Image: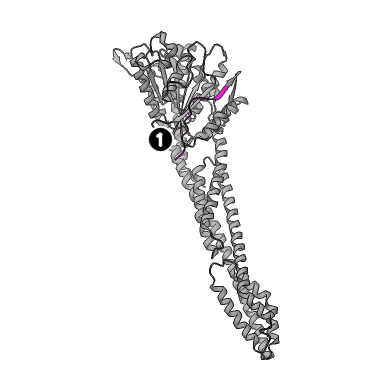
Amino acid sequence: MAPEINLPGPVSLIDNTKGQLVVNPEALKILSAITQPVVVVAIVGLYRTGKSYLMNKLAGKKNGFSLGSTVRSHTKGIWMWCVPHPKKPEHTLVLLDTEGLGDIEKGDNENDSWIFALAVLLSSTFVYNSMGTINQQAMDQLHYVTELTDRIKANSSPGNNSVEDSADFVSFFPAFVWTLRDFTLELEVDGEPITADDYLELSLKLRQGTDKKSKSFNDPRLCIRKFFPNRKCFIFDWPAQKKYLARLEQLKEEELNPDFIEQVAEFCSYILSHSNVKTLSGGIPVNGPRLESLVLTYVNAISSGDLPCMENAVLALAQIENSAAVEKAIAHYEQQMGQKVQLPTETLQELLDLHRDSEREAIEVFMKNSFKDVDQTFQRKLGAQLEARQDDFCKQNSKASSDCCMALLQDIFGPLEEDVKQGTFSKPGGYRLFIQKQQELKKKYYQVPRKGIQAEEILQTYLKSKESMTDAILQTDQTLTEKEKEIEVERVKAESAQASAKMLQEMQRKNEQMMEQKERSYQEHLKQLTEKMERDRAQLLKEQERTLALKLQEQERLLKEGFQTESRKMQNEIQDLQKKMRQRRTCTIS
């Protein structure tokens, strides 16, 4: 079970100092410790519109994010509060409260646009908070949405950064929730009641015409409809009498408007139940370290004068995670081999079988922890390191076997060598007695288990080193005729040649086993890569199907409203998306 992170209060994530956005290292340290998937809810809106109150409620607290009670904006930059998710066990809720937009003291629309863009990029649910109704003034204040394609790149390819390419953005962008504070209208049309969602959709209807005024009217609405096809609306009455608003967070529940209390509860319930885990392209869930990497990548891009690129951020994150995935896989391999392998192994195949099992698990660890491994760069690194580890274990195995066998030979044949020195066999019939004793000791050597793969080679090397000693005993044995001695010399030579041929065969067999293992390793890498790519392809298709459904729904709305031109543009987007989906379905893995 991953440890929970429960901050006692918010911390600054991104400071806004003299118009410069700077990441707070302490906040990054907090994120790096969150191993659970994160649900990221960001709220954006004009200053002094009560954003912080809603975020405190989502955290389940009365106090936390600073509310303020004057016309001055209290929140600067982006503040973060990480709490255990109240409705999703093993998940962390990350709340982002942003600096109020349009602060007259700041006088920097450029800075506001970056705050807005970062909130979109980092969240899985994006809450836009405003006062009153959705009228043209409210839409004009939401001009930041029309600038998103000027602030964010979906990918690094040139020419793919316009509202008409919104399908690329939709897969990255969060769900959109519009909260309307101090709402005083009756929700009805032609005397019939409507929902807050109906009100939002009516407010997003386009106006016929191509003049400048119509374009100004339609642009923000069209951007919301294209970039945020998954959207929701909540309305809130006045929370209390005006004289109490300055100390809203201190008011008791009985002092608040009952309708407001109910509306806040409904909002919190929806957000906590329907906000998804923040994901990357391919459905990859974001945890604390991944969110940390996104924050750094986006803010660094802005600071260097570039546009934050979603594709580049994911690839930069992939570089970090894939490198770590290789380390995790190697650590797992070494742990498994350390537990399973007892050197020396009786045969080379025994070691290779243990390697193969540990290698398979290591590849599984890598596949689980890696993503976007372009051209399998990191998988190849893993393969090379695993092969190097295998070679190292083989060398260790050979050395352990050699050491074991040499010690064993010294223990078994040592007394025989001592007898030779004492002249025990320097007598008539001594040679036959020596050979008989040597055969007995060889048999004893062969009977000792787990000598390892060098057993025969070390024995033959030892016997060869003692040939001069054996020959001296043979030549001094007066019971043997010269002919018998010649025959014995030839027998010894034949035995030695036979042993050498046997060792050569054994060496060839070992080489064949190593080649077979190399092929099995390649097949295991290919098998797991194929399975992962199939899973990734299925997940991407699922995302694209969801985006396609939302696009088709939006196109149908445009047709009903009589906007043929916009409908045709949407149709082009749909056709491009369908083409990509067909290519993904038919692509093969090489």
Residue found farthest to the top: 243
Residue 560: tell me if it is visible.
no
Q: Position of residue 13 (x, y in %)?
A: 54, 26
Q: Is residue 169 magenta?
A: no
Asked if residue 378 is positioned above or below residue 49 in the image, the reply reads below
- Residue nearest the observer in this picture, 329 or 60: 60
- The number of callouts visible is 1
Q: Is residue 2 magenta?
A: yes
Mark 1 sits on what residue? 89
Left-right relation of 405 to 214: right
Q: Quadrant of residue 245?
A: top left
- Residue nearest the observer in this picture, 399 or 252: 252
Q: Main secondary structure of the magenta part?
A: loop
Q: Position of residue 556 (x, y in %)?
A: 38, 25
Q: Quadrant of residue 499?
A: bottom right
Left-right relation of 587 to 559: right
Residue 570: tell me if it is visible.
yes
Asked if residue 446 is positioned above or below residue 161 in the image, the reply reads below
Residue found farthest to the front: 422
Residue range corresponding to the magenta coloring: 1-15
Q: Position of residue 109 (x, y in %)?
A: 56, 16
Left-right relation of 581 to 292: left
- Quarter containing the N terminus: top left
Q: Position of residue 211 (x, y in %)?
A: 48, 12
- Residue nearest the observer in this picture, 249 or 166: 249
Is label 1 in a helix, a strand or a loop?
A: loop
Label 1 sits on what residue type? Pro
Asked if residue 92 is positioned above or below residue 489 in the image, the reply reads above
Q: Residue at x 39, y 24 (%)?
A: 268
